[in-house]
Image: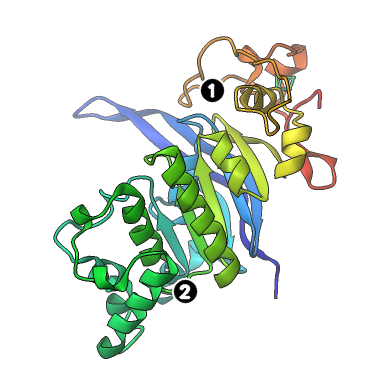
């Protein structure tokens, strides 16, 4: 069996921008995701981090097939998402499940929690109806809910419990990959920590693979085996979580890490303040997209786009000077 569960090759998503109401004319495209490459190994957590608007949410939508790919490929378990037929897509949707940031908006307020969790089993006719309740109660206990809460409504649960419901719903179909989209950013720190621990426990028990997207580096560092850093539609660095923590090489990664709490309380680190704002993805800078904000940029940086290249085994960065 191939170790790679999900692989993106030159994955691109551009959103066309038009002008004019009657004779509308395409005037450009928002380059939300612009030729990114990454792979996720079975059983690992791959974290994608970057500021809002960097393209990580669009990447997640491409994986969930909520957006169509402009060019490039996404392979899941050796199969190209772009060539899947209806049946294969349905099977894929069972094997890749999302957990979103705001559990309340993703849970139907009128459905009892047991049926929210069990709905995928009903829709996909995975189990006979008579067995669904017992299966849901079993899953509720796995995620730390009481089976006596089966008939309660979402508003009767706290934010943390609602995220447990979302996790329960995600694992109902025995998925291979769970896409965690800012899974704890709407929760208090201590509740968020409990959810992260729950996610880690069920990952081990069920052999799950996670694709995590978050803007909070502390969450990504805590959860991930490997980390990808995204800036303006591009992945600028990929490395094992520890390697990235100790030896970030891309100037943007360095700035991002310098603004986060150090891994060890005794570590003294100086925050790198980046000048200016993130430029518009409608008209990204030439060459290296980070060059207008980079303190060590050279002439070549404004002309040539740096590709991801291997710095050391498992560590890649897209920087001319790395
Ligand atoms: Fe900075 Fe140049 Fe490296 Fe881009 S390629 S990060 S501008 S040094």
Q: CA distance from mark 1 to mark 2?
A: 41 Å
- Tally the numbered discs: 2
Mark in front: 1 vs 2? 2
At x 53%, y 10%, the residue is: 276
At x 34%, y 61%, the residue is: 165
Mark positioned earlier in the residue sequence (1 or 2): 2
Q: Position of residue 295 (x, y in %)?
A: 70, 11
Q: Position of residue 131 (x, y in %)?
A: 31, 88
Q: Above or below — where is 3 with respect to 219?
A: below
User: Which residue is more in the foreground, 38 or 133?
Assistant: 133
Residue 192 is drawn in which quadrant? top left
Q: Within 8 Å: ligand 1 and the Cβ of disc 2? A: no
Q: Residues within 10 Å of mark 1 (few under 14, many from 20)?
A: some
SS type, badge 2: loop
Q: Residue 35, which numbered label?
A: none
Residue 15 as seen in the image, left or right of residue 123: right
Q: Residue 174, which numbered label?
A: 2
Which quarter of the image is occupied by the C terminus? Answer: top right
User: Which residue is more in the foreground, 209 or 142?
Assistant: 142
SS type, badge 1: loop
> Which quadrant of the picture is home to ligand 1?
top right
Q: Above or below — where is 220 with respect to 69?
A: above
User: Which residue is more in the foreground, 19 or 266?
Assistant: 266
User: Which residue is more in the foreground, 225 or 98?
Assistant: 225
Q: Position of residue 285 (x, y in %)?
A: 58, 19
Q: Above or below — where is 285 with respect to 317?
A: above
Q: Above or below — where is 125 with respect to 73?
A: below
Residue 104 in sight here: yes
At x 54%, y 41%, the residue is: 219
Which quarter of the image is occupied by the N terminus? Answer: bottom right
Residue 157 is drawn in which quadrant? bottom left
Residue picked out by circle 1: 284
């Amino acid at each position: 069996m191939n170790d790679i569960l999900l692989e993106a090759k030159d994955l691109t998503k551009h959103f066309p921008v038009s002008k004019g109401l009657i004779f509308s004319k395409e005037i450009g495209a928002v380059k939300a995701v612009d030729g990114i490459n990454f792979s996720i190994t079975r059983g690992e957590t791959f974290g994608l981090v970057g500021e809002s608007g960097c393209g990580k949410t669009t990447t997640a939508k491409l994986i969930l097939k909520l957006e169509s790919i402009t060019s490039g490929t996404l392979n899941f378990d050796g199969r190209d998402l772009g060539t899947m037929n209806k049946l294969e897509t349905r099977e894929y949707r069972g094997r890749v499940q999302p957990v979103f940031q705001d559990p309340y908006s993703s849970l139907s307020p009128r459905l009892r929690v047991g049926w929210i969790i069990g709905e995928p089993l009903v829709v996909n006719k995975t189990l006979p109806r008579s067995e669904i309740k017992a299966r849901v109660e079993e899953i509720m206990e796995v995620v730390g809910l009481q089976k006596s809460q089966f008939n309660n409504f979402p508003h009767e649960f706290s934010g943390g419990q609602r995220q447990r419901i979302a996790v329960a719903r995600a694992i109902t179909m025995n998925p291979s990959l769970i896409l965690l989209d800012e899974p704890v950013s709407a929760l208090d720190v201590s509740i968020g920590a409990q959810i992260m621990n729950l996610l880690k426990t069920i990952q081990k028990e069920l052999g799950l693979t996670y694709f995590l997207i978050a803007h909070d580096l502390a969450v990504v560092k805590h959860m991930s085996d490997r980390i990808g850093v995204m800036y303006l539609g591009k992945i600028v660095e990929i490395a094992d979580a520890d390697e990235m923590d100790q030896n970030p090489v891309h100037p943007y990664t360095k700035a991002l890490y310098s603004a986060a709490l150090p891994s060890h309380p005794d570590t003294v680190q100086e925050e790198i303040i980046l000048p200016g704002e993130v430029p518009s993805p409608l008209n990204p800078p030439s060459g290296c997209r980070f060059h207008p904000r980079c303190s060590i940029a050279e002439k070549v940086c404004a002309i040539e786009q740096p590709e991801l290249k291997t710095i050391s085994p498992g560590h890649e960065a897209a920087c001319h000077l790395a």
